[in-house]
Image (cartoon, rainbow, N blue to C red):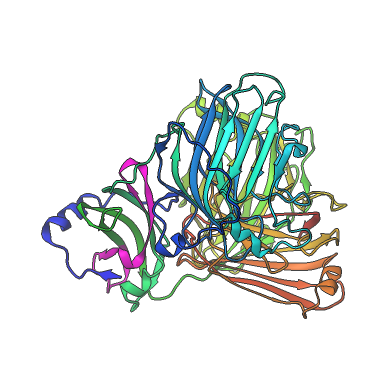
Amino acid sequence: MKYLNKFVSALFVATLGIMTLASCEGADLYKINAPDWLSEMGGEEEEPEEEEELVGQMEDVYNIGKEDLSSGFWTLGKTYVVPAGAKWQAQFKLTVNPDNLYYKNFYLVLNAYNAETGELGDEFGVIRYDNDPSKNSEWNTVGTEIDRSLVSGNFSNSSGDDSVDASVQKMNGTVTITVDRAEGGMFIKFTNGTLTKTYTQTTAFPSTGADVPIACRIGIEGSLVSFISTNIEPIGGCTSAEDKQPLSMELSGVPTEVLVGTTLEEAMANVTAVVTFEQGVTKDVKAEELQFEAIPNYDELGQKTLVVIYNKTFKGLNADKPILATKTFSVVNQLSAFTQTVVVPTPLVLGAEDNSTGWWGAHTENIKIEPKETKVTTFTNFTSGGANWNNFVIVLCKADNSEYAVVRADNFGWGDGYAGCTPIGGFADDEGWAAWLAAMNGAKVTTYVTNNGDGSGDVKAVMVGNDGNTYVQEYKGIKIADPDDFYFRFTVDGCHLVFDKELGAADCSTGWWGAHSANIQVVAHQVCTVNFTNYTSGVANWNNFVAVLCKADNTEYAVVRADNYGWGAGYGACTATCDNGGDWATWLSAMNGAKVSVKIANNGDGTADVKATILGTDGKTYTQDYIGINTIDPDDFYFRFTVDSSHLVFE
């Protein structure tokens, strides 16, 4: 890592000019030129087929996936649109994972494409390079467009009941892909000269017979695709292999707080950047390739602006002009130690379902909030639509119901503690309020009520409306006379609330990814606790709870299961440990009705931890930990739960 004590004056002036610019964490799947060690992992040559004839190829050089082979499922490349009657051919180098899991290769995603709007339509299905009839080597998403009986291949790595097979290394090498719609049907071919998979459909594709353009995307999981060429220009254009100047960068892993006395080098060791070069090519850059400065004096307490400099071309030469990015952080005497707890109020349905319950007509029980704690609640809001105030209301009070403040969903409140607070949200015009009110009928709401421990409290409501838009209402700095006597509850006014308690069908019939809880934000240096009862079909270890760590837009950092397994961009760096006594059969049996407490920690340094404590029905306590999940943006960190032939009841 390079650590600057002083800037040259010209660069310092440039830096000050961008002090007000915000920089946020981001990611891009396109990177080019794999390292030397990847170039040596070519596939075995066994009775090579006749080389595929390529016509009209254009240079298109970029990578799909990370070079360390850590990219998770649904890491997708560019979009190539194949009109009816056309033929797409492309070449790329495939590098598969040394863990030899048969499904970690590449796949082709087929969507309808609207040429007028430029938007993707129905996803017809996915065809993967492996060819195992007992596994999901291809699948339909909409309808029955992909017929598995039309697939053929010469693969020798049929995995049967075993997901690990060393023969998957034969997939390595230069792959040619063909998608031919010339005859009105669909012919698809994947081949690296040794292993070939084809899909031949002579009837219309899609089955409607319409001449729909087909959008094709290559995706990977735990592998690397290094694109070489294509005969159809992708959306956004081709990428050349010439050297490129850096244009901008987005930072990730910048801590929100740094303990005083920590060197800047130590504090920023987990910082990474996605640098965008000419032609839209991007590259992941680690901390040792970046230069850091903190302004003002880093040795003093208070908020600082981190200035990050990168001055290399794509090929590592000195750039014509360095690029800069900034982000704020604070130097503190003691790191914050807030906690979060997810709670389910009672009753589970508040107010009459026809929204006839009037003002103050129904209340949940009071829920206590300890100092430096946030209570998180999720529910669906239904409104009569008569007025803005016909939505949820939150009452902040003491145990004896003496009120500190009352705040509504619509940027309004009252009470002794409300007078000094800062409401954030709302609309300046009637048109905005009308759209918001309409969207609140059926809105998915997550509320955060915080006891700051210093005589103040905060309320935040994130409302995902029925129009798909997200609305946020906050009340900061509500005066709380006694932080040791701080409760909240919900009430209604011409509305009703349905609180989220169960996830998945009670008979455990909900399949993989079939149901999800709401996303819950965990801010930097905070730990969120979720308590629930886990029920399982008992068929397999993975038929239990699953935690998804992600950004607000659902971009995944990692997915972790109850049974010591996970995946995703941040999963490879973590340490996964379980204590089940080494007896998975006993553990699985004990999981049906097990009492589970899961803690999700945002460490504030670009890493996160997940710890599960499980009290099984056999009376034994089991643990499952995932420590050090990385690639986390501490300012954009959320989690949710999903199921797989399991059922969760939250407490």
286 falls in the magenta region = yes
Q: Position of residue 610 (x, y in %)?
A: 62, 67
Tell me the quadrant of the picture where the C terminus can be found.
bottom right
Residue 412 appears in view: no
Q: Position of residue 245 (x, y in %)?
A: 26, 48
Residue in the image at 87% along x and 75% along y: 618
List x then y, in percent, for residue 45.
56, 56
Residue appearing at x 68%, y 52% in the figure: 155
Examine the structure image and report whether residue 413 is included in the region drawn in magenta: no
Location of the N terminus (image quadrant): bottom left
**With respect to residue 370, does 472 lie above or below?**
above
In which quarter of the view is residue 125 placed? Answer: top right
Q: Quadrant of residue 302?
A: bottom left
Name the residue located 67 percent from the left edge and 66 percent from the top edge.
565
Magenta-colored span = 275-304
Query: Does 301 sit above or below residue 249?
Result: below
Q: Is residue 62 visible to the viewer in this orientation of the structure?
A: yes
Pick the residue in front: 290 or 527. 290
**Relative to 564, does residue 228 appear above or below in the rendering?**
above
Query: In the image shown, does 642 or 334 lie closer to the viewer?
Result: 642
Image-quadrant location for residue 167: bottom right
Residue nearest the viewer, comparing 131 with 626: 131
In this rendering, position of residue 182 left or right of residue 157: left
Q: Is residue 556 left or right of residue 156?
A: left
Residue at position x 49%, y 39% from top? 90
Q: Residue furthest left?
A: 9
Observer-nearest of 500 and 212: 212
- Which percent across, then down, holds residue 293? 25, 65
